[in-house]
Amino acid sequence: MKLGANSVLFGGHSMEAAFRYIAMAGYDGIELSAIEGMSEHLVLSRWRELAPEIKRLSREYGLELLAMEQPSQDPERMEQAFQAAVEIGIPIVNCGPGGTTGDEASLQERIDSLGRLATMAEKYGVTLCVKAHVGAAIYNTPTTLRVMEAIQSPAFGIDMDPSHIYRAGENPVEAIAAVVSRVKHIHIRDCKGRQQSPGKPEMQANGRGDIDLLGYIRVLHENGYTGPVNLEVIGAKEYSLEQCCIIAAEARGHMQACLQACGAR
């Protein structure tokens, strides 16, 4: 497994700062945030301009470009994301599920949309992943299994985030075991309690909350998963570099310990 961090943790700082301090924390790679309104280190409307700089930063700081997060399912924006991914060398584009929890029509609409985007991803030779998300049409294991069954494209996979599954009232260890055959990306963070929000950024650091992340990583290892495990901590846009670095280092240390405990490193 490759340990990375989403640059959203450093959303209040420059892209180079994100690369520098994620590398200093000991991660193998980085997931670039292209999240409008939250953290847009990769501005998709300017991706051609930014591509050489991203490649330079990857080389200079020794970080593999593991993925990109672009939540919208807007076809035009997704095509920009796929084009950028091909040129920059990013193998995975993570998008959000959209829609509304508990609405069958909304779920089917999102499945249809993701199916079309998976076809587009296949054309570009990249992988599209979606994750269950609190409040969205795809929000738990049963709805994740629905989308897995409906979309058979080899360019489509599941991005599993234990914090969203936990807040949906499920056991993340059981959930990951149920979908692991199609998992191609992991967003990882902890959370305390099952409220809608994941909590303060520092409480999202692995090991700070209630989730059995060792058990979660053990299931991945036992099933031969070797893809990215990217820390995704949100809400830190106003945090200082020091605060962001502490979260990154603490979470990475916990992930490394989990990998060692289950024999993955």
Image (cartoon, rainbow, N blue to C red):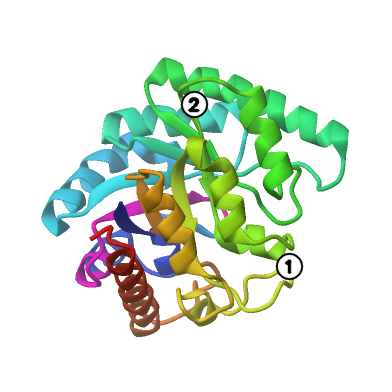
Residue at 54% in and 23% down: 118
Does dot 2 land on a helix, a strand or a loop? Answer: helix
Mark 2–mark 1 distance (CA, rounded to whole Å): 31 Å
Residue at 56% in and 59% down: 173
Stretch of the chain drawn in magenta: 21-37
Residue neighbourhood size for the residue with mark 2, other residues' Cα within 10 Å, grouped as few (<14), some (14–19), many (≥20): some
Query: Where is residue 241 drawn, in percent x and y?
Result: 35, 79
Circle nearer the N terminus (2, 1): 2
What's the residue type where badge 1 is placed?
Gln
Q: Quadrant of residue 115?
A: top right
Q: Quadrant of residue 254?
A: bottom left
Mark carried by residue 102: none
Does 35 appear in magenta?
yes
Residue neighbourhood size for the residue with mark 1, other residues' Cα within 10 Å, grouped as few (<14), some (14–19), many (≥20): few
Mark carried by residue 196: 1
Task: Find the residue positioned furthest to the left.
Answer: 60
Residue at 53% in and 70% down: 212
Query: Where is residue 185 drawn, in percent x and y?
Result: 44, 45
Residue at 73% in and 42% down: 142
Q: Of residues 199 and 188, which is closer to you in this image?
A: 188
Instruction: Please indicate whether residue 88 sits to the left or right of residue 177 in the image.
Output: left
In this picture, is 168 found above or below 10? above
What's the residue type where badge 2 is placed?
Glu
Read off the residue under disc 2: 79
Looking at the image, can residue 77 be seen? yes
Camera-nearest label, 2 or 1: 1
Does dot 1 land on a helix, a strand or a loop? Answer: loop
Query: Where is residue 53 drawn, in percent x and y?
Result: 22, 47
Does 79 appear in magenta?
no
